[in-house]
Image: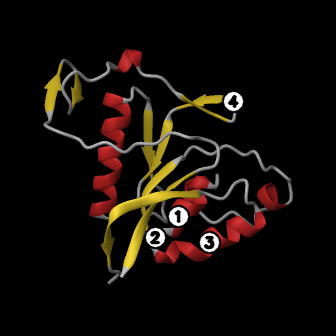
Amino acid sequence: LLIMTILRCQCCSVFVFLLATAARATGSVRTCLGDSIPVERRKNISASGRPVPLGLWELNWESARLMLNVARILAEERLGYHVATGRGPASDYSASSIHALAGCYNGADCINDTKVGGSGDTELVGDWHLNFETWASAEPPLERWQAAFPQRAPERIGETGYKGTEA
């Protein structure tokens, strides 16, 4: 039995913990919540002084996509942020979220890359800031990042509220 956790990158402090309700379409932009914040009034977050959309890293299974989409809807329509979602070739594995939130391209492991390890670039800001379902297989990469580059390692900010098993 495992507890799935929510991770965030070190450079942002946006928290999304509300529940979504009924869907509806408004104008040319489809929204899910009544009285949504219009797209033109949404803002970027500031990550290490740089304005960027809130980046949500997607993992490739249904429960992870569900959590991501609830967060996306709430962040856009209720909190008023621009949101980018993405995934990479490794999105079938929880470990990709660790690498993506640490700033690696496409969620690939880059901890030994000379641009990361040899540059002393501890302030690298990646495109991905939150992930909503990370399993036990992500613990070893998370521990490696915490040991090698603690300022870039993703931070566990809570649990999803449900437990699951790995097949």
Residue that mark 4 sits on: 49
Q: How dense is the environment of label 1, judged by Cα within 10 Å: few (below 14), some, or many (20 and up)?
A: many
Drawn side of residue 35 relative to residue 161, left or right: left
Q: How dense is the environment of label 3, judged by Cα within 10 Å: few (below 14), some, or many (20 and up)?
A: some
Rounded to the nearest whole Å, what is the CA distance between mark 2 and mark 3? 11 Å
Q: How dense is the environment of label 2, judged by Cα within 10 Å: few (below 14), some, or many (20 and up)?
A: some
The mark found on residue 134 in the picture is: none
Residue for point 59% across, 41% down: 12
Residue that mark 2 sits on: 93
Toward which corner of the image does residue 162 lie, by quadrant? bottom left
Give 35 or 110, whichever is nearer the viewer: 35
72 vs 156: above or below: above
Where disc 3 sits, the SS reads helix
Rounded to the nearest whole Å, what is the CA distance between mark 1 and mark 3? 9 Å
Looking at marks 4 and 2 on the same chain, the residue that comes earlier in the sequence is marked by: 4
Toward which corner of the image does residue 65 lie, by quadrant? bottom left
Give 121 or 132, whichever is nearer the viewer: 132
Asked whether disc 2 touches disc 1, contact meaning CB atoms under 8 Å apart, the reply is yes
Residue type of the residue flagged with mark 3: Pro
Looking at marks 4 and 3 on the same chain, the residue that comes earlier in the sequence is marked by: 4
Where disc 1 sits, the SS reads helix
Residue for point 32% across, 21% down: 37
Residue for point 17% across, 21% down: 26
Rounded to the nearest whole Å, what is the CA distance between mark 1 and mark 4? 25 Å
Looking at marks 1 and 3 on the same chain, the residue that comes earlier in the sequence is marked by: 1
